[in-house]
Amino acid sequence: MTDSVQSQLDASLAQLGALIRRGRELGAALAADPASAVAQAGARIWQHDCANTVSQLSGGSKAHWLSRAYSDALLVRSSDGGAMVEAPVTDIVGRVLGVLDQAVASLSQPGAAAAAAQPPHMHRFDFVRNETLRPILEEAYADSGRALDEGDSERSLLTSCSILEAIITDALNGAAISDMSFGERIAAAERAHLIRGGCARLPAIARTYRDLAPGTALSARDARVVRQVLNVVMRDLDPGR
């Protein structure tokens, strides 16, 4: 390992250590007074700094394991099974601290510098029964994320919808669903208790994605919501995620 690489690694560890100390202090302050405006504001600034550090360590890639772990830490399920778009700061400080601890553990391993640019291979869709479909879904999931980052709302939304329909169809293994619409498949999966109520947040336009006319305007907000719903349903179908 060169001196420059070691210096960069040491700087990253020091940066993470400082964020962890700040996070613990903020967590203690919020535990003492959850309504403290000062602690709430400080936590939001800290969260922004954490996001910047995660982006830096991930090379700006949303597909990097650390970026995904950070994003997952911000996704909090509501009581009805849906995903909250903006989780309360008090609920995510501990989650983000856990992600920072993972980053420190990763960078502290022997050979961490050489492996930093190589995120571990993910197996998000191992719960899918159709093994041939798994790598296709992995690539589609990554493409949906890239499209969202690039501002291509149409590609992101349509790809996320197709993944969502594919995994729900796979979960309804053996059911007579060939003539069912996307919405009917969702309802069937909910009746079978395969998924919870996360799909209630799907925009109406997403439920009819197969029949959209060319050039239909699709918003970035709708694309983000569909992506969030997809993550919730993936957790329903694979509780161990």
Image (spheres, rainbow, N blue to C red):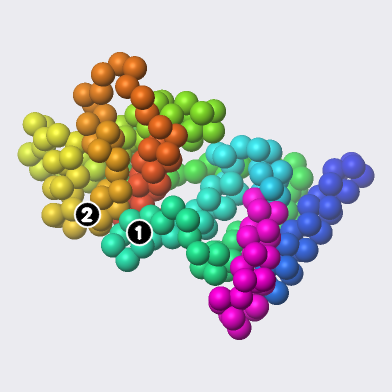
x then y, percent, for residue 43:
64, 65
Amino acid, disc 1: Pro
- Measured Cα–Cα span from mark 1 to mark 2: 11 Å
Q: Which residue is mark 2?
A: 194
Q: Nearer the viewer, residue 73 or 236?
A: 73
Q: Relative to residue 15, is residue 33 depicted above or below?
A: below
Image quarter in which the C terminus is found: bottom left
* Mark 1 Cα shell of 10 Å, populated few (<14), some (14-19), many (≥20): few
Q: Which residue is mark 1?
A: 239
Q: Quadrant of residue 202?
A: top left
Q: Residue at x 78, y 63 (%)?
A: 18
Q: Secondary structure at mark 1?
A: loop
Q: Is residue 170 visible?
A: no
* Mark 2 Cα shell of 10 Å, populated few (<14), some (14-19), many (≥20): some
x then y, percent, for residue 69:
55, 52
Q: Relative to residue 28, is residue 64 depicted above or below?
A: above
Q: How many marks?
A: 2
Q: Relative to residue 219, is residue 27 depicted above or below?
A: below
* Mark 1 or mark 2, earlier in chain: 2
Which residues make up the magenta segment? Answer: 26-51
Q: Residue furthest bottom?
A: 32
Q: Residue at x 57, y 39 (%)?
A: 62
Amino acid, disc 2: Leu
Q: Nearer the viewer, residue 130 or 162?
A: 162
Q: Nearer the viewer, residue 2 or 149?
A: 149
Give left or right: position of 37 versus 16.
Answer: left
x then y, percent, for residue 213:
26, 18
Q: Quadrant of residue 20?
A: bottom right
Identify the disc placed on residue 53. none
